[in-house]
Image: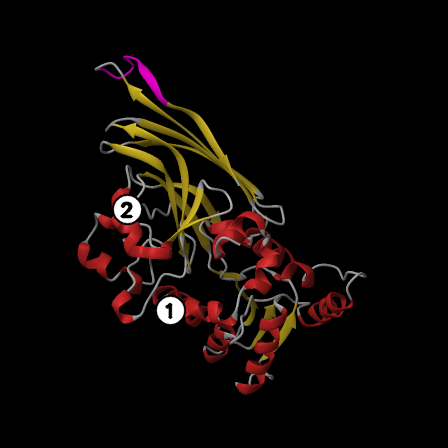
Amino acid sequence: AKYQGIKHLSISPRDICDTYSSKEQLGLFMDVPRALHIRHAINQSVAGKTVMDIGCGPALIYTRWAVEAGAAHVYAIEASNNIYELAKKALIQKNLTEKVTLLHGYSTDLLSPPSSSSSSVSSSSKAMKQVLGSGVDVIIHDAFGEIASMDGCVPVFDNALRSVGRRGTKVIPSQFQTYLFPAEIPPIHWLNATKDTWTHSADDRLFKVYGFPSNVSLSDAQLVEDMTVEPNMPMQSDREVEFVVERDGIFGGFATYIAVNMHEAVEGLSTSMRNMELGDKSNIVHTSRQFDRPITSLQSITPRKVLEGESPSWWNLFIEFPATEVKRGDKISVKFDAEYNHSQPKYGLSARIQRQTGEKEGGGSEVVLSPHSVSW
């Protein structure tokens, strides 16, 4: 593998499970804003409730937080063989056996009719039917990629809500979004300074970037994926958006970042760069500690205190397009589509750039970049 992020291009989310080490999973908690937001949501939601933690990890962190917050019982699910064994040890070491039922397997198997081809899945499914016959009050599943849905969370949420959700079941998080913006390729000194943060994938046009610098953006970000976690989630989406270039530069492609709302879903939620960065600066500095705002993967919106050991746990994706000179006022038309009902979500992104040639609107235009597409 060329780099760790190759998972989202050629390996399905199921296959990711056994490639994650306990060190990597525990490393999520170096992202202090993310951890604080989800713990706050758990504290506000689980007292006296029955909880399901999908993808509980080796140390049962979210499960333990739920127990500490007063959950009546937690059903913790872990698919990875190695991490499940570590979770079993943690269960005993932390004295959680009375409050927690630990189950091994993929939630989409465990919450579905038993499979005759797998005795372990079958026995677990029977256990699930016994203990979850009345459903659960709270579902926790915190697995997102450089595009929010990239790690396969949509079918997981949909299956869980169909199987064990009931009227009033709360999901943490409640909403997730993916934003896209046109950008230049960062200057070489930035790439050298960040060393391994700019890494190629199996497809030479896709890069996984750690802490993408938003100052190379050519326009504000726009929403291309907006999902509220609720029953009967859509298994495909498509959006058409148009960017107006804000400054002259060399367009190199599109960058993504995600926004995850741990609390109640908000209709019309906007976490665009300009909305956040040009707002009240005193608030922006402390965004990572404000629980009424979504948590994002973009450092300029959700700061991490790097000097104090914090680091983002989500990367950004850069989708490279042919280098094209652009001028202020040029229009970049984009179509983004996604299909979620596959073992690996599928995505497509197409774009074209037009320039106004007349002095007045409607006075003619020229195509600066013909329609160009990338699929993965």
Indicate yes or no whether the magenta region holds residue 361: yes
Residue segment shown in magenta: 360-368
Q: Nearer the viewer, mark 1 or mark 2?
A: 2
Q: Callout 1: 10 Å neighbours few (<14), some, many (20+)? A: some
State how many labels appear. Answer: 2
Residue name at image x 52 percent, y 50 percent: 8
Q: Nearer the viewer, residue 28 or 340?
A: 28
256 versus 138 height, above or below: above
Q: Callout 2: 10 Å neighbours few (<14), some, many (20+)? A: few
Q: Nearer the viewer, residue 165 or 329?
A: 329
Percent across and percent down for residue 181 are: 35, 40
| Residue 229 visible to an observer of this rendering | no
Element assignment for label 1: helix
Quarter of the figure with residue 128 = bottom right
| Residue 270 visible to an observer of this rendering | yes
Indicate yes or no whether the magenta region holds residue 350: no
Q: Nearer the viewer, residue 103 or 3?
A: 3
Element assignment for label 2: helix
Question: Could you tell me the amino acid type at mark 1?
Answer: Met
Quarter of the figure with residue 312 = bottom left
Q: Disc 2 designates what residue?
A: 188
Q: Disc 1 designates what residue?
A: 30
N-terminal label among 1 and 2: 1
Question: Could you tell me the amino acid type at mark 2?
Answer: Ile
Percent across and percent down for residue 82 are: 60, 72
